[in-house]
Amino acid sequence: MLKKIGKYVIIFLLLLPVILYVGVVITNDILADGIETDLMEYSLPADTVLEDSMSVAGKLVGNGNGMQYMGSILISSDLNEAQLKEYYEQRFNFIEVHVQEDEKIDFLNSPNYSFRKTFDDTEKTYYSITCWDSKAVKKLGGFARFLLDLDLRGH
């Protein structure tokens, strides 16, 4: 009986790091998805159409270690970059507005991030509206922050 219990304890201890890591990855993805959702739920300016959206968790720009969270929407609009930035800064901190000429997101370190939308209408002007970090991340305590930084995508 003791050998059987010991066997289960050893299996559990071997699986625990994998279970914890998967939980950390899922939690980080949920935090990034929350930023994307916040952007999508915010009302669009006049003469603007939501075309696509995406979110990413990982080490996205800069050097060093640590998780970064980004949500981004792709819009087509008659407004210019400055007007869009002013509009979205009323609600969000850490906003970037970029003209998008294709689906690739050029300002990230990795070439692997892009929108799904194909740019088939050359009459439209497309912009990415990107929000960094999230309110939820800032509310986390030091230990929770430490755990979320164990995600290998942040290194």
Image (spheres, rainbow, N blue to C red):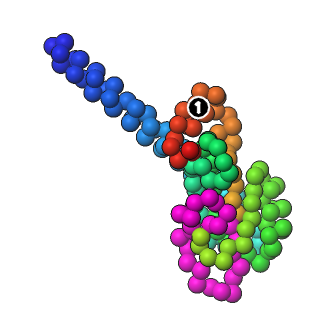
Q: Is 117 situated above or below 6?
A: below
Please provide the residue range marked out in magenta.
105-128
Is any part of residue 41 visible from this angle? no
Residue depicted at 82% across the width and 55% down the height: 90
Q: Is 29 situated above or below 116?
A: above
x%, y% of residue 137? 65, 39
Q: Is 122 situated above or below 4?
A: below
Residue depicted at 69% across the width and 82% down the height: 124
x%, y% of residue 91? 77, 53
| Residue type, label 1 | Phe
Residue depicted at 64% across the width and 64% down the height: 73
Residue depicted at 69% across the width and 59% down the height: 130
Tell me if residue 106 is in the magenta stretch: yes
Instruction: Give the residue furthest to the left.
Output: 1
The residue beneath circle 1 is 146
- Determine whether the residue tagged by mark 1 lies in a helix, strand or loop: helix
